[in-house]
Image (spheres, rainbow, N blue to C red):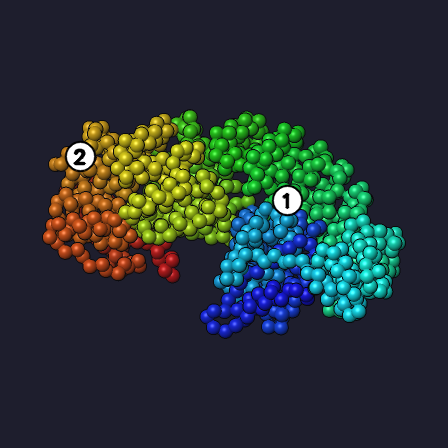
Amino acid sequence: MVERDAELAIVDEALDQLTGPGPDAGGALLAFSGPAGLGKTTLLAELRRRAHARNCAVLAARGGEQEQSQPFHVARQLIQPQLAGTSEQELRAALGSWYSIVGPALGLCAPEQGVPPDPQGLRDGLDWVLTHLVVKRAPVVLVLDDAHWADPESLGWLAAFAPRAEHLPLLLVVAYRPDELPAHADAFRTLPGRAGQRPLPLAPLTPAAVATLVREAVGDHADDAFCQEAWAVTTGNPFEAVELTAKVRGKGLPPVEANAPQLRDLAAAQRGSGLVTRLERLGPSTVRFAWACAVLGTAIPQDLAARVAALGAEEAADATRRLRDARILSAAAAEESDAGLEFVHPLIATAIYRAIPDALRVALHGKAAAAVVDAGLGSSAAARHLLETHPENDPWVVRTLREAAGENLRAGAPEAARRQLARALLEPPDFDERAAVLYELGCASLLTEPANTVNHLRAALAEPSDDPALRQGIVIRLAQVLAHSDRLAEASESLAREIPNTQDVRGRLRLQSEQFMWDAFNAAETDSPVRSRRLARLADRLTGRDLTERYIIGLRAWDACLRGEPVDVVLHHAGRVLEQHFSWAHEDRGFEVPVLAAMVHMYADRPGRAEELFEVGTAEFERHGWRGAHLSFAYSLRAYIRYRRGRLAEAEELARAGLRLAERVGRRTPVHWYAIAILLTTLLARGRADEAWELAQEHEYGSPFPAAVVFPDSQTVYAELLLSRGELRAAVAELEAVDRRLTPRGIQNPAWCPWQLHLARALAADDPQRARALADDAVRRARAFGAASGIGQALRVTAQVAAPEERAGLLQEAVTLLSASPAGYELACALAALGAELGDADLLMQAVVTARECGADGLAADTTATLLRLGAAPPNAPAREDALTEAELRAADQAVRSEKEPVPEAVVLPAPDWALSAACRKLGTDRPGLRAALEAFARSST
């Protein structure tokens, strides 16, 4: 290597840091950039040699111009060799739960039928596999050459993974042509290398360096003018300079000034038309073989190239020899006899490929597709060739592309599947196959191009089809993508148009269940009460014999919860749904209804049961590689359950995890609204209103609010933020808008949305009479629903706006009810309010302890200040005990054995049983749910 001392010094420094002892040892990032021929590949080869000399494990891959459309081509080069020769049993043990997620992408196993991983889940899995390999085989050097030609799936993954290298025993090195690096890999342009260096550009060689190369090749007697001309005609490009000196030596050209003019013609023969002319002199069979190799790409099996070129084995061997002698194909290394043929340099491959006549190049790709299928390499390997062919109305092409798309979709490469199906559509498919291809194309583009997905699916519906199941699938998928694009009314309308035309009774019921679901999530639904009555009539006569019926019953439970029907009715319907396992990741169903069936338990004061269901559902998401929007929803809603239980620190941690995942999906998407609303609610409960406001501003949380129903309600949360800032008029305007939106829909449950209570607080100073009326109505509605936490919250806020003589009684009832509920934060608020109202230091101390247990720091501080004003010392902060104590367990057992009912209003309220109260909070249940909660506790304990 010439004039690469500076780059090699950086390489050595990085390798020394990677392999050295002490705390400073560690990984690094190196990126080399430069136009074609400047020696990136040679530099990386030397880096690999030096890494091997230091006993580093080396993972190497190279992007290929012809392989860019083949998903995970680079990832397979990196990881497959490390797992070669491993049995399936050993692979399963090594990869654990990631086996079925990353195995298909890496070519280690066939994709399973069922739900595919989402792209983010697959990236997380690849992260895990690579990290595991690095830790196991440290120190590791990962080398990616020609990164500009890497497939988008691999390149996007590595660009996101690269910053981790500095925290692992990993030196990650990439080389690329800066002008050809695709947009999805822009991260490589700005990745900081060692000591904050940016990617290192390689410079052309100086005249002195080219002179050195010339004299090493032809002798020290080469004169200066000859060497200077060699530099001029190659512009200091190392590849061209080396090839030129080889030609000078091969022709026996004396290196003197008189022969310098011949160098320009010799240099031209290495590129473009000169290279093509030189190739043509080798004979037609050799030209066809070179063309076949250029079409096939890299690591070319000789027999495959022979078939594409229509040559026999002896002719192919002879062509290979000629191409190697001409320095077009690389000489075979003894240790790489099975590695396949390679071009000396990608510049040569590109020039030959582009020199193939257009029609012939298309034909060669067609022959290559058939050849790779016949060789057993599969439809995915053939698909990249078929993408380069012209449509010819060939059923085999459509079938092969559909098979490849199905494999790629199940392997987690929807964009590759989309490209293949779009090409299949152009072939075109047979008349009776077109609807199916459009449907598959819609499924493939669902995550990346929702607008185009709608167009594809609507086109599929316009196609005549005699397959009712296919048509039903198209309608359901269309409704799904419309709903996820915040077009819920259109989703419902598309289903409504199809339902009357569906003859099959079960098929019609399935479509009805989908329409009921999207209507339930439509915040602007106009005929909600009518829909609720239809849903109730239908669900009440269903038995739950199949998944469709259980979905409808689950929607009935949710609707009953929103409308504030008695909690026993809500739990009855939820119980009917959950008599059998209720999958959260069914292949052709959404996860929405299983989530709703879990959430009704939270509103019904059974958050412990809700968490059990969410743990199972979250595990199912992770098992299937759903680590984008699905996992964000799961984390955020689990955070909301923790918030309702008064476990605010845990709620904040989960909500932030949900928000991080939501940020990957995109801002102002449904999952982002959920994550922000729940985190804001939690921060307000923790007493960090300023931080909540800053977060809302950062994420542009506010009007316009989403068309989809979000819980907690987005506009109500925004109004609560305004209240915390003292912006009462603005809060009133928002809450009155909530009233106009929810009341016509019949959503009356303050346990689901306490807008009346917030509006009462906002109006208390200016319109106390209206404030009391609102609070009283909220209490009435909460009592109709029957959840102790909802009633307790309503009573507490009512006390804030009530006449002074009524406050103590309202707060005493609130404390009694909340003490037998799982709502720890609400209990702390009620205790603090009652203690302050009565000037009772004991109640205030109990409030401080409860607030601290909840993580309600602001409430604990305020209540402590009230205690100090009364002259009482605040309580010590005992260590929080999450596990049930023996006293709490005895109190819960006793309550179950006695089956005590809540004390009627007319009777004098008893003092709370604090051991039983703690048991309810820790078990996540109210008193009526204690028996089931204790049974679940006993099962988990054993």
Residue found at x 70% / y 51%: 65
Crowdedness near tag 1: few (<14), some (14–19) or many (≥20) residues, C-alpha within 10 Å: many
Along the viewing direction, whichever of 888 and 35 lies nearer the viewer: 35
Q: Is residue 88 visible?
A: no
Residue found at x 50% / y 41%: 590
Check disc 2 and report the residue beneath it: 802
The tag on residue 272 is: none
Q: Report x, y in % for residue 408.
A: 63, 48
Q: Does the residue at mark 2 contact the one at mark 1 (Cβ under 8 Å)?
A: no
Along the viewing direction, whichever of 505 and 808 lies nearer the viewer: 808
Q: Could you give the CA–CA distance between mark 2 and mark 1, rounded to whole angstroms?
A: 63 Å
Check disc 1 and report the residue beneath it: 417
Q: Report x, y in % for residue 790.
A: 28, 40
Q: Is residue 548 left or right of residue 214?
A: left
Q: Report x, y in % for residue 923.
A: 32, 53
The type of residue carrying mark 2 is Ala
Q: Secondary structure at mark 1?
A: helix
What is the quadrant of the C terminus in the image?
bottom left
| Mark 2 / mark 1, whichever is N-terminal | 1
From this viewpoint, which residue is outermost toward the left? 871
The answer to whether 786 is drawn above or below residue 342 in the figure is above
Residue found at x 68% / y 61%: 206
Along the viewing direction, whichever of 166 and 936 lies nearer the viewer: 166
User: Picture quarter containing residue 235?
Assistant: bottom right
Q: Is residue 813 visible?
A: yes
Residue found at x 84% / y 54%: 278
What is the quadrant of the N terminus in the image?
bottom right
Crowdedness near tag 2: few (<14), some (14–19) or many (≥20) residues, C-alpha within 10 Å: many
